[in-house]
Amino acid sequence: MAVMEMKRIGIYARKSDRKRILELLQRKGVVEVHSPQEAEELFSKTDTTTARATFEKNAQLLLQSAAVLDKYAPPPRQLPQILRGRTPVTPQQVEETAKNAGQAAKAASQIAALEKRVIDGEAEVLRLQAQLEALRPWAGLDISMRTRETPCTSVFIGSFPEELDEAQLKNRLALALPETAEVEAEIISAQPQQTCVFLVCHKSCAVQVEGALRAMGFAYPAAPSRRSPAQRIAELEERMEKARHSAEQAKQDIAAFAPQRQDLLFTADYYAMRAEKYQVLGDLWQSPHVFCVLGYIPGEDAPGLQALLESQYRAFVEVEDPGPDEDLPVKLKNGFFASPVESVVEGYSLPGKGEVDPSKVMCLFYYVLFGLMLSDAAYGLLTVIGCGIGLWKFKNMEPSIRRTLRMFLFCGISTTVWGVLFGSYFGDAIPVIAETFFHTQVTVPALWFEPLSDPMRLLIFSFAVGVAHLFTGLGVQFYQLFKRKQYADAIYDVVFWYLLIGGLIVVLLSTEIFQNIAELPFTVPGPVVTVAAVLAGIGAIGILFTAGRESRSPVKRFLKGLYGLYGVSSYLSDILSYSRLLALGLATSVISTVFNQLGAMLGGGVVGAVFFILIFLIGHAMNMAINLLGAYVHTNRLQFVEFFGKFYEGGGRKFQPFAANTKHFKIMEEK
C-alpha cells in the first residue's frame, strides 16, 4: 500500500540560470510547481501569455502540416504508436531540434500554403465542371448564346422544361402563336426535363412570340457565354486542366517534404514543451536577479534533485515536510505484481488524505475474480501468450500500456489456473473433436469439479470468495483507523461487524435448510453455533449502541443505532453480488459448448472439418472477446462497489509534475 511521501520543495537560484534549470526540471519531471498567490513586494510574476500562445500556435501548425503530409505522402506501414511508443531522443538531439525549429516552422508554412493551393485548385475544378455540365447541352450551337437579334429578325435562345422532338415543338408553337407570326425553330439538344432550342422570327412579331414562348415555359440561359458554347467549352476545359495540374503539382510538392516528417513532429513537441515551460514561467515569482520554484516532489526524488541543482547551478534548495492542512498531490508506487492495477484504482479515485493505497490488497482479488469469471484454460492461455508477446517484443511502449498488458497477463494466468481446475478448454472442445472426427472418447478431467455439472458448489464458493473479499476490505478499514489512533472507532466500525456478520454466517451454515441446499460435507458442532450466536449478538448490540455515537440525544443515538444495524442487509446484498462469478463463469462455458456443438453438426469428413473450423474460430473469438470485456467490467464493479465501499473514499489529487509531455518523442537522460 504505497502512497509516495510528498515533500515541499523550494528552489532559489540566479535568474541567469533560469532557462537551464527549468529545462532540467522539465526533463526530470519530478516537481509539481505550486506557486503561492502572494509574495514579498520585491518579487513579481512575468506575463507569458503572448509567448505561450505563439508556441502553441506554432505547434498546432506543425501538427497540421504533418497531417497534410500524411494525407498526400502516407508514411510506410508501421505498428500503431500505442505499441511502438515514442521515439527516444537525447538532450543533445532536443537541442538540435531547437536550433532547426525555424526551418521546420518554415517548411510547415510552405506545406500549409501548398495545401491551400490544392484546396483552391480542386474547388476551381469543381466550379468549372459545373459550368461545363451546364454548357454541354448547347455544344451544337455555333453562335454566341447572347445573340438576341439581327437587323431584321429577333432571336430566342433558351430551353423548355421538358423533352420535345421537332414535331412536338412545331405543333405547340403553331397552337400558341397567331397565324401571322412565322417562327423558325431548331432543337439544339433534348434530354429529360430540358429541351434547348434556337428560334428566330421577324422583328415585327417579336413581342407576340416572346409572350407565347413564356406561356409555354420558355427560359433564357442563366449565364449565357459571350463566345459560342463550343469555344466556351474548350476554354473551360483548358482552365480546368490548368487547375487540375496546379493541384497535382502542389500535391507533389507536399510529398517532397516527406523526409522532414519526423522533424515536423519533433519540432511540434518541442514547441509544446516550450509552451508548457512558459506557462510555468508565468507562475514563478521573480526578482531582478533571483527566481524561485515552489512545489511538491516525491520524497525519494528530492535528495538527487537537490544535489544536482546545488552542484551544477549553486542553487539553494529547501526540502521540508508539508503541513497537515496542505492539499498534497498523490502518486502511487507499487511493485511488479500490484502496479498493473494502479490504473484501476485511479479510474475510481486516488486515495484521499490519510487513506492507504489499496493496490496491493486488491490486486490478488482482482486477478482471482477475473479468472473465475472467464475460467477457461484455453482463453487464459491465449491471453497470456498475446500479452507476453506484446511485453517481450515491444520494449518501447508507454509505461501505462505496459502495465495494462501486464495486468491482463496476470488475469490470463489466473484464468488458465481456474480453467484447469474446472476442466474447461474451449469449453468441451476436446471431447467433441475426439468424438466427431476420431470416433473415440477423450476427456480431460477437471482437477477440482465441473461447474456445469455442479453449479451449486461454484455458487457457494463464489459467496465464500465474496465474504473473504468484504472481510479484507473491513480489515483495511481497521488498519486505517488503527494507524490514525482511532482505536475505539476501529472496534465500533469494524470489530462489531466482524462479530455480527461472521457469527450469522456460522449460524446460517448450521441450519438444516442451508446444509440440504448446499450439500455441505460437514456439520457445524452445536457449541460452535452457540458461540457464533453469542458473538453475533455482541456485535449487534455493539452496533446498536455505537453507530449513532456522534449524536448527543439518547433518542437520536438509539434510532441511528437501529439504522446502522439495518446495514446488515447491505452486507447480504453485497455477498449476493458475488453470484456474478457463477453467472459469468457458466456463460463462458455454455456459449463455448454451444459453438462446439454447432460446429459438429455436419459430422466428420472434409466438409464437416471445414465447417467446424470456421464455426470454431468465429464463435470462440466472439465468445472470448465478449467474456473478456464482461470479466473486466464486472471485476471492476466488485472492486469499486463492494470492496471499496467498506473502507475507501478516495478524492485524492493526481500528482502532475512539470514534465516533457510530448506525443512523438521522449527525452532519455544520459547515464
Image: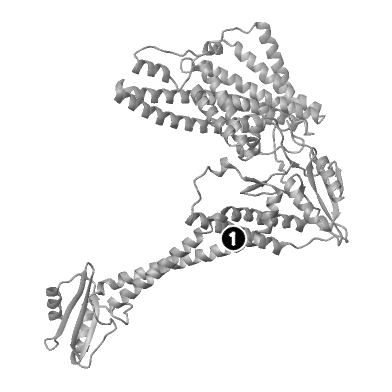
Q: Residue 519: x, y in percent?
A: 53, 10
Question: Residue 108 lies in what quarter of the image?
Answer: bottom right
Q: Nearer the viewer, residue 447 or 501?
A: 447
Q: On the picture, is 492 further left or further right than 398?
A: right
Q: Residue 512: x, y in percent?
A: 56, 10
Q: Residue 168: x, y in percent?
A: 13, 73
Q: On the picture, is 235 further left or further right than 22?
A: left
Give above or below for 106 relative to 561: below
Which corner quadrant holds the N terminus?
top right
Q: Residue 286: x, y in percent?
A: 83, 59
Q: Nearer the viewer, residue 147 or 252?
A: 252
- Looking at the rendered structure, the kind of residue marked 1 is Leu
Which corner quadrant holds the C terminus?
top right
Question: Residue 61 lies in what quarter of the image?
Answer: bottom right
Question: Residue 414 lies in what quarter of the image?
Answer: top right
Q: On the picture, is 555 further left or further right than 429?
A: right
For label 1, the residue is 61
Residue 636 at least partly seen: no
Residue 269 at least partly seen: yes
Label 1 sits on a secondary structure element that is helix
Q: On the picture, is 120 further left or further right than 540?
A: left
Give above or below for 38 relative to 376: below
Q: Nearer the viewer, residue 479 or 105?
A: 105
Q: Residue at the location (70% across, 23% down)?
A: 497
Give above or below for 476 relative to 350: above
Give above or below for 255 relative to 239: above
Q: Nearer the viewer, residue 9 or 555?
A: 9
Q: Residue at the location (36% across, 29% down)?
A: 614
Q: Around disc 1, counting alpha carbons within 10 Å, would you say few (fewer than 14), some (14 to 19), or many (20 or more)?
A: some
Question: What's the image's color scheme?
Answer: one colour
